[in-house]
Amino acid sequence: MATEPRIIKFFETTLRDGEQTPGVNYFPEEKLAIAQALADMGFDTLDCGFAASSPAEMECIRLIASKVRNAEICSIARTHAADIERAWEAVKDAEYPVIHPFVSTSPLHRQVKLGKTRDEVREMARVAVAQARGYTENVDFALEDSTRTEHDFILEVCEAVLEEGVRFIAICDTVGFALPWEFGKLVADVKREFPQARISAHCHDDLGQAVANALEGLRNGAERVDTCINGLGERAGNAATEDVVMAIRTRTTDLGLDVRVDTTGIVPVSRLVAKLSGMQPQWTKSVVGANAFAHGGGIHQDGVLKDARTYEIMTPESIGLTAADRRMHMGKLSGRAALGAQMRELGYELEKEQLNRAFDMAKLLLGKKKVLEELDMRYIAETAVGRTEVTMVSVETIIASAETPGS
Ligand code: MN
């Protein structure tokens, strides 16, 4: 009998690490709208910001804490006493408040950023968690730059924060340096030493490994994952929420993991974040890119038109799109099946010979023009069915005019 998949939790940080994306600046009501959308999808903890960074940020987190009742509301904090006090001030009216202090643990960060010894850093972590625990039981702690930290020191810091009653410990690939098996092993090592520790995987995408690292962390015992919608975040971004959700949902049996979020909210929230952040996902972005359900090659198009499962591993419906959002791109490499389907959408039912003629014309035109627009397609169709006087010569005339400089 198959065992039940383990449900993983999310530390959704679109509103915090995601807002650290260079170029992103949300207004408070925008952060509130994103927070509510994420909460309604079922994400567990919303990392809403860094309360101590400014009075405006503090007010914004307070606003979210007072309005969004169906998710945990979190503020991060340095280990400074004043930061932790402000974080609590920001989240204390939430239904489920969370304080999340962090400290850099790697030798480079200890030396260059903090000017502290290992013992000092460990005690900063301990004292911060103890102080935060004075306000709430929901205290999570992040070891910044974990993946470049000495192995024994990670265990030392984990032990200290566990002694003070920390809830989740975030193991962080802050700089996106880890490879998947290394990150998995790091999580497994911490779990082996401290089976009672609950781990959150915080992974950046500098080498394009964020989602793979996060999945390896989860497979090796992490209970939670830190993610951003559309893969936003510092530099190359964080593990994308939609990628982690759909990877787990699509491969749940093989991973032995599942998620408890409403996946049909993915595209709506991705579009909301794209609009409010001003950052559109690249066309080929996994899950939410404009091309995620678009097909360009003739063999692929023919397959998808017969049965979409030939080239799609998720349905558009599962992420909040419809079958109508599936797209057959008429390009240089496209096939007759896709052209016929597109012509039908424009209202032309072409017979075999007409379709062959239209196909030849389309290919000829695409030798000179990057994309066929609707007008081109209508012109080709009208010509193919013989409703106009124009012939192939006329298509060549269009080509000639397209080549005229300035046209
Ligand atoms: Mn980060």
Image: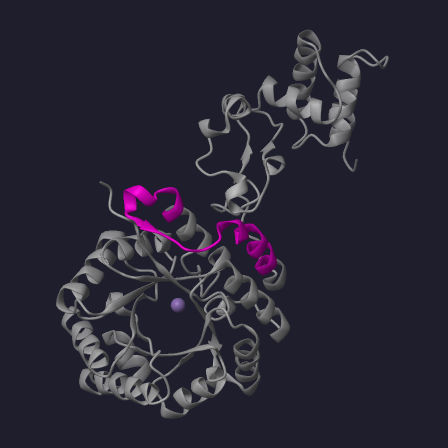
Quarter assignment of residue 98: bottom left
At which x and y percent is residue 306? Answer: 53, 21
**Residue at image point 28% right, 42% down:** 254
Q: Nearer the viewer, residue 122 or 9?
A: 9
Part of the protein shown in magenta: 248-274
| Residue 358 on the magenta segment | no
| Residue 255 on the magenta segment | yes
Q: Could you tell me if residue 25 is visible in this image? A: no
Q: Could you tell me if residue 225 is visible in this image? A: yes
Q: Quadrant of ligand 1?
A: bottom left
Q: Is residue 312 above or below residue 2?
A: above
Q: Nearer the viewer, residue 29 or 284?
A: 29
Image coloring type: one colour
Q: Tag count in the figure?
A: 0
Q: Is residue 124 above or below residue 1?
A: below
Q: Is residue 185 above or below residue 163?
A: above
Q: Nearer the viewer, residue 60 or 79?
A: 60
Q: Is residue 32 above or below residue 177?
A: below
At which x and y percent is residue 39? Answer: 51, 64
Picture quarter with the C terminus: top right
Answer left or right for 107 relative to 355.
Answer: left
**Residue at image point 22% right, 40% down:** 1
At which x and y percent is residue 297? Answer: 52, 26
Residue lying farthest to the top in this orientation: 353
Q: Nearer the viewer, residue 297 or 158?
A: 158
Residue lying farthest to the bottom in this orientation: 82
